[in-house]
Image (tube, rainbow, N blue to C red):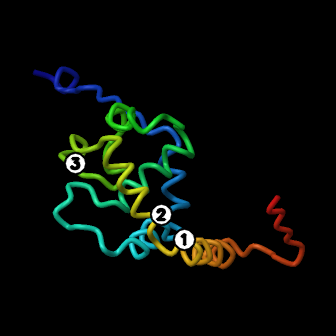
Amino acid sequence: MNNAESLELESETIDALPIINHFIDRLGLDEIIECAMPHADPSNHIMPYTSIGMLLRNIIIGRLPVYGFKDWITLFDPRLFNLKPEQVDYINDDRIGRALEKLFDTDRASLMTEIVLKSIREFDLKMDQFHNDST
């Protein structure tokens, strides 16, 4: 058998996830969310902060309903979502909903402040002409 016969083509979807993950990693966003949700049960197959990370990535590129997450994520390498391959079977809308409840129970004001301050420092954002329109 020659080398050409032993080659296989393997196709994977990556979409914009490597770019999105670069900025999420640069901000340390996964770690910030993990610290904000410290009381997660370690017996969970997928920790709530990981579910929130999946939701965030979906909002940025997919905007799919949570009941379709498992089908959506199976298109990708699970590591792009900080998942192990065996964890994909545990993705469901109930798990995402419970993670959102845990996020709601956190100190969201402090969480938002930490993310904003990290963004300002990390990307050297100039705040001399910043206006927050809360209407």
Residue 93, located in which quarter of the rendered image? top left
Furthest-right residue in this view: 129
CB within 8 Å, label 1 to label 2: yes
- In the picture, measured across the screen, residue 110 lies left or right of residue 66, that is right
Residue name at image x 48 percent, y 65 percent: 25
Nearer to us in this view, 8 or 87: 87
Nearer to us in this view, 110 or 125: 110
Residue 108 — which label?
A: 1
Residue 121 — which label?
A: none
Query: Residue 2: horizontal and vertical position, in percent?
Result: 15, 23
Q: Secondary structure at mark 2?
A: helix
Residue assigned mark 3: 87
Say which amino acid is labelled 3: Gln
Against 83, is 123 above or below? Answer: below
**Sequence order check, earlier mark of 2 and 3:** 3
Residue assigned mark 2: 104
- How far is the residue under mark 1 from the one under mark 2? 7 Å
Say which amino acid is labelled 1: Arg
